[in-house]
Image (cartoon, rainbow, N blue to C red):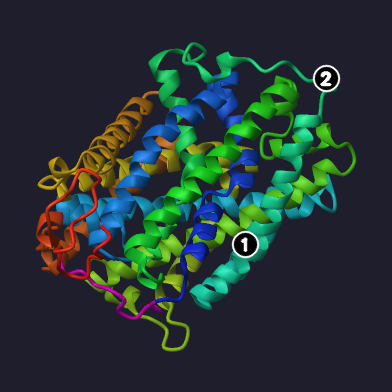
Amino acid sequence: MRNHRGRGLQAGALGTFDTVVMAVAGSAPAYSLAATTAVLFGAVGTAGPAALLYCAIPMLGIALAYSYLSRIDVNAGAGYSWVGRTLHPFLGFLSGWALVVSATVFMVAGSLPAGSLTLALFDERLARNTALATVVGAGWFLLMLLVVLGGARLTVRAQFVMSGVELLLLALFAVLAVLHSEHARAFDWSWLGLGQFDGVSGFASGALIAAFYFWGWDVTGNLSEETRNSRRATGLAGLIGLGVVFLLFEVFTVTVNVVLSAEQIRADETNVLAVLGEEIWPGWGGRLLMVAVMLSTVATLETTLIQVTRSLFAMGRDRTMPSALGKVHPTWNTPWVAVVVVGAVALVMFVASNALGTVGDILSAAISAIGLQIAFYYGLTGLAVVVAYRRMLLRSPVHFVLGGVWPLFGALFMLWVFFESLGELSPAAITIGIGGLAAGLVPMVRYWRRGSDYYRPARLDAARTVETEYVPTGRPPAHTRVHEGLPTDF
């Protein structure tokens, strides 16, 4: 498989700050807190801050893996390309397929809350109508579909507005929460310890949900062909974005433990953040945080569309999926066929989702299913960087730890969470999560038999990409010889 760089997509459309904004928006801090806090509380109780903390450590290893791999292979498919060129093309395809399935499922998991939140701003009773929430959510989804179709620059401009307002509101309520003392419990350090988990399986369940919180920062990898200085910028943006959302998640999860009772958390499982806002600032707080969650939900729909359409674009370009998916619009420089296909599939899923029950029921099953697929493709990507850099890791202590040990730990953790969680999930979550992965075997076998070049890859090996001698600081000497465009600041 060749390293396709900048073929068709608008090269250099985004800068480093743009991709940081996309990374933060991808993890959707307000949406994740609103929609997932009740699910996390149901799984681990008040140990939610601990679950996020102990998942963030290996998640940072995966972010480091993305940073290192993006330096030697710029590809809109990201893990799809990296895993395929290091571990095996079959695993690479399934890695990309896992992202496609998880992102497509999220179209429902994200659009329904967007619809219900919009309705709740006018009438709480309307928000409980799943069919009406589906229609409004589908409207938001179609609007974001048009924005993504309009190109990377239009996409990031929309993100500046939506994510900017969201983060300002979250920062405001973080300050107000510190000042809030009425009916508040005292902070307990045990919330950050391992003692409150219900055994190993309870810890794994919490970690799986925490993975869903963080998921989305890796959109920077899918934007690599459209980012200036992408070999450095995309990895850096992912690391910064992960750090920002981790701080927000910890602050608000601890605040929920301090301010809200178990009954209040369960009172509105689809928007705990609105309950928190009402408790901190009666009258206005709930509505303001409802606006933050709505903007966050719409913003992350946009970044998820970027991930799935760029992944399908890379697959179409490599002919591991229908080649039409690799077509780029001549004016907007976007994979318009992939955008249209994703839109059509998602709209069908919106209609089908009404048979699954309430918005809360759909969210609970979708979050766990998506968590399985996230753990799967993150784990494979963490292994991929170790294989790609295997002949270079001992040349520098810095790269041994940051490019080897830490990503390997992250990979093993994610894969352990994947297998350990299987016995604890509901049949619906298992069916969506594992069934969605298994469905990828059909196109994989079909296009492998057709002889796609993807299944005869040029192996990804960092030692062949750059030849250098490392000094103890990890910086190369002046006589570095560069191949395939790898920057000398590696």
- Residue 450, x across and y down, in percent: 13, 68
**Residue shown at 70% from the left, 45% from the top:** 170
- Is tag 2's residue or tag 1's residue first in the polypeptide sequence? 1
In-front residue for pair 188/445: 188
- In what element is the residue under mark 1? helix
Q: Is residue 347 left or right of residue 38?
A: left
Determine which residue is flagged by label 2.
183
In-front residue for pair 488/278: 488
In-front residue for pair 363/260: 260
- In what element is the residue under mark 2? loop
- Residue 419, x across and y down, in percent: 31, 29
* Residue 128 visible from this viewpoint: no
- Residue 164, x across and y down, in percent: 66, 58
* Chief SS of the magenta region: loop
- Residue 128, x across and y down, in percent: 74, 44
Q: Which residues are magenta?
A: 1-11
Q: Depth-wise, is mark 2 or mark 1 nearer the camera?
A: 2
Mark 2 surroundings within 10 Å by alpha-carbon count, few (fewer than 14), some (14 through 19), many (20 or more): few
